[in-house]
Image: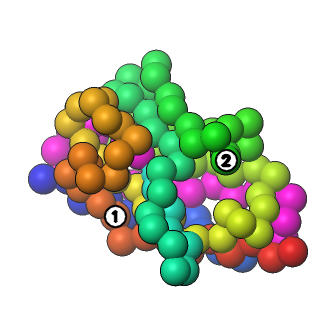
Amino acid sequence: QVQLVESGGGLVQAGGSLRLSCAASGRTFSSYAMGWFRQAPGKEREFVAAIGWSADSTYYADSVKGRFTISRDNAKNTGYLQMSALKPEDTAVYYCAAKHTIVDITQDTTYDYWGQGTQVTVSS
């Protein structure tokens, strides 16, 4: 069992930056791949970024590539999503999630554990 808690969301102007954190507790965080997803009002949850166990492999949605950076610090049991050049269309609740394998890492249905989400609002 892994418990995930996101933090770092908030209100930011377009063009600004935020860093989201995902603190993990329970089983060894380093044995899980981690992903970030987001859900805007009236829309389905969508993949944002993911990272393998050792951070050697990273994956990004086309919509955030070049603007967002996913990372992890296994010693601190924490994952991060650095978001830059934010746009109003990035407004959503952001969730971190964990899974045992990197198979289908962009698919939310394959994740085993989820955080409660943190709101990110980008004003124009």
- The location of residue 2, given as percent across then percent down, is 20, 53
Identified at 30% across, 60% down, the residue is 114
Q: Residue furthest bottom?
A: 42
Q: Which residues are magenta?
A: 12-35
Quarter assignment of residue 33: top left
Q: What SS does tag 1 mark?
A: loop
Instruction: Choose the circle earlier in sequence order: 2 or 1.
Output: 2
Q: Residues within 10 Å of mark 1 (few under 14, many from 20)?
A: many
Q: Residues within 10 Å of mark 2 (few under 14, many from 20)?
A: few
Q: Residue furthest top?
A: 56
Q: Which residue is mark 2?
A: 63
Residue type for callout 2? Ser
Q: Is residue 68 left or right of residue 61?
A: right
Q: Is residue 6 visible to the viewer in this orientation of the structure?
A: no
**Residue 115 got which mark?**
1
The one nearer the camera, 50 or 21, is: 50
The one nearer the camera, 44 or 81, is: 44
